[in-house]
Image (cartoon, rainbow, N blue to C red):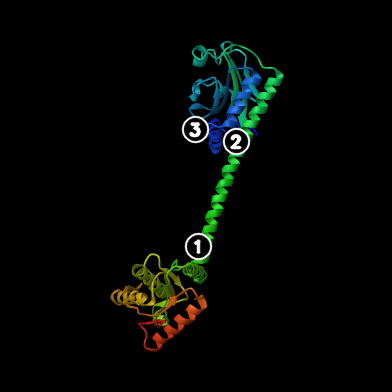
Amino acid sequence: MNHRSTLSSGDYEERRLQALADYQILDTRKDDAFDEIVEAVSLICDTPIAVVNFIDRDRQWFKSEKGLGVQETPRDISICAHALLQPGVFVVPDTTQDTRFADNPLVTGKPHLRFYAGALLKSRDGYPLGTLCALDYEPRELTKRQRFALQALANQVMAHMELMRSHRIQEALIRELQTTRQELELLSSTDSLTGLLNRRAFDERFQQEIAMIQRGGPSGSLMLIDLDNFKDINDTYGHKGGDNVIVCFIELCRRVFRQYDVISRWGGDEFMVMLPRTSPSDATHVASRLHQQLAETPMIMNNGTSLYCTVSIGICAVTSTCTMDTCLSMTDALLYQVKESGRNSTAVQAET
């Protein structure tokens, strides 16, 4: 693809530099694959110097080099920069006899380069990025076979770079898929309004707790909480007002419960809390703190009014023989007792 014929020189160079940047090759660490290609060039072309280089905006940077001893040179003295303008393999038999290079510091001074042969390293869309080149301190020529081999090895350099880029793209896609999967798992296991675990996720956490208890861990407690008269709140303040109450309530719960207690939104105005390593009697103290905090903490509605909420709570023990269904039945029954007796209190399973 001939980009030079359709772009201004400035635009062409910017796109060439972007093509180079896309490979993320500049200033990378040594790579055995490139070093082996450089050794092969030196052997095949019978030259003391061989280089894989890339032409950046202001410098010539060497990914791999043999016999040169430097990592980069200024672009304005680069012989390889001239190769970017030539198709195929660019050969300079004697630099001192070429007006483009006779005054070049690399020719007139150390390392006194006299011979140059470079095969283009071209991006997949045709932009020249640098060269694979062979250099010598004496004038010389390359045979037809050597030219062919130099270009073939240059093609291998680009094939390796394309493979590296493919691996990076694949790794990025894998990371993106993992992130998406984690987000989907989070969405499938949490309540969208509160961020709490939903029923399915809470049930899984409950099963884990039972397994720990069966392996000898201490028993725990389960607390079912119902916001009293929540329908009246929705009727008075609308569903947005109701959502605001739920969010405020959960913020208060996070201050009351411990970090390792597990809170779930069980239904519209019902919440399940698992308290590991906590007896039902100890759980009642937590419930009392919740009642007290609710009595002391107003919930500010969207219209600026203050609202005080109350809750009804049922608490049962979580032991090695429990199931989610038996615990739910027990806490439901206890919650019903509280509601029948006037709400805003706690009922706890009798100790056995």
Q: Residue at x 49, y 15 (%)?
A: 105
Position of 24 compared to 149: left or right?
left
Residue 92: image location, x then y, percent? 61, 16
Label 3: how many Cα within 10 Å (few below 14, some 14–19, many 20+): few
**Spatial CA span between label 2 and label 3:** 14 Å
From this viewpoint, which residue is outermost toward the left? 296
Look at label 2 and name its amino acid: Met
Position of 85 compared to 224: left or right?
right
Q: Quadrant of residue 271?
A: bottom left
Please say if the residues under marks 1 and 3 sit with CB atoms less than 8 Å apart.
no
Query: Which element is circle 2 on?
Result: helix
**Quadrant, the C terminus:** bottom left
Q: Is residue 185 above or below residue 233?
A: above
Q: Nearer the viewer, residue 317 or 71?
A: 317
Q: Is residue 337 above or below residue 138?
A: below
Look at label 3 and name its amino acid: Asp
**Quadrant, the N terminus:** top right
Residue identified by numbered label 1? 186
Q: Earlier in the sequence, mark 1 or mark 3?
A: 3
Residue 130 visible? The answer is: no
Label ID, residue 27:
3
**Spatial CA span between label 1 and label 3:** 39 Å
Q: Earlier in the sequence, mark 1 or mark 2?
A: 2
Label ID, residue 161:
2
Query: Which element is circle 1 on?
Result: helix
